Amino acid sequence: MSSPSTDASQGSAKDPYLAASLPWTNRAARVAWAIGYTLLVRFSPRPLHAWRAAVLRAFGATLGANCHIYPGARIWAPWNLLCEDAVGIADGAVIYNPAPIRIGSHGVVSQDAYLCGATHDIDDPAFPMISAPITIGRYAWICARAVVCSGVEVGEGAVLGLASVATRNLEPWTVYGGAPARVIRARRRSRP
C-alpha cells in the first residue's frame, strides 16, 4: 500500500478525486461572480431589491418583475437562475445551481433553505459530480432550513415544511414535512 504523501504527490492526473468537476470557464465565471456578489450585493441595504436584481441580471440571471432577493442569499451561478415574477429568496438561502433552478411566480425560498442542484456518483471511482435541474412551482413555499435535492420538481402551491428534505417530486397544493418529506395534508388553493 502506498503512503498518503506518495498518492498526493502524483497530482490530479493520477487521482480523479483531485480533478476539477467543471471547466475552467465556469470556475472563472464563479470567481467574477464572487467578487461581484461581495462588492455589489452582500452589503447592499435590504430594501434595494431592484439593485440586486439588476446585478444578478448582469451576471446572467433571468428574473421577472418584483423579485425580492435579499443580500444574504447565496446564489452559486446566477446564469443558471430563472425566476418568474414576485419571487422571494430570503437571507441565508443557498441556491447551489450547477444546473438550472427555476422558481415560479410568487414562489418563496425562506431563510437558510438549501436548493441543492448537484450530487456525486458514489459508485464511480472518479466520484464525478452529477447535476440536475430543480423546479419550484408557482406559489410554492420552501420553508426555513428545508432542503430540495437535485432533480426534484416542487409542484405549484406545494409547501415543504421547516427543516424538511425533498428527495422526490412534491405534488401541487400539498404540505410536506420530515426527512425525507412526507405528505402532511392538502393545502387550500388560494391565489390572488
Image: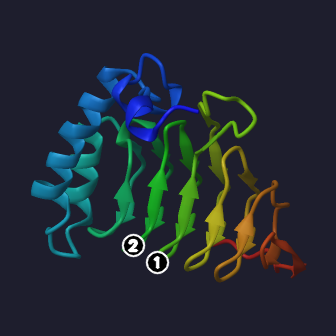
* Quarter that holds the N terminus: top right
**Helix, strand or loop status at disc 2:** loop
Q: Earlier in the sequence, mark 2 or mark 1?
A: 2
Count the labels in the image.
2
Image quadrant containing the C terminus: bottom right
| Residue under the image location 74 percent in, 50 percent down | 153
The location of residue 86, given as percent across then percent down, is 46, 62
Q: Residue at x 44, y 30 (%)?
A: 7
Q: Which residue is located at x 85 percent, y 60 percent?
A: 171
Residue 166 lies, with reference to residue 189, above or below; the image says above
Pinpoint residue 129: horizontal percent, then vertical percent.
Answer: 58, 34
Taking the image as shown, residue 175 lies to the left or right of residue 66, namely: right
Q: Is residue 72 left or right of residue 93?
A: left
To which quarter of the image does residue 132 belong? Answer: top right
Q: Considering only vertical position in the picture, is 152 above or below 188?
A: above
Residue 102 in view = yes
Q: In the rendering, which numbered label is found on residue 92?
A: 2
SS state under label 1? loop
Question: How is the protein colored in the picture?
Answer: rainbow
Q: What residue type is labelled 2?
A: Gly
- In this rendering, is residue 178 above or below 151? below
Query: Residue type at mark 1?
Result: Gln
Instruction: Please give the name of the residue rendered at 40% of the width and 30% of the height, measured from the top-left corner.
Output: 6
Q: Which of 16 and 155 is in front in this view?
A: 16
Mark 2: few, some, or many residues within 10 Å (few <14, many ≥20)?
some
> Of the numbered discs in the image, which one, if any, rests on residue 111?
1
CA distance for labels 2 and 1? 5 Å
Q: Would residue 139 be visible to someone looking at this image?
A: no
User: Which is more toward the observer, 137 or 178?
Assistant: 178
Discs 2, 1 touching: Cβ within 8 Å? yes
User: Image quarter for residue 23?
Assistant: top left
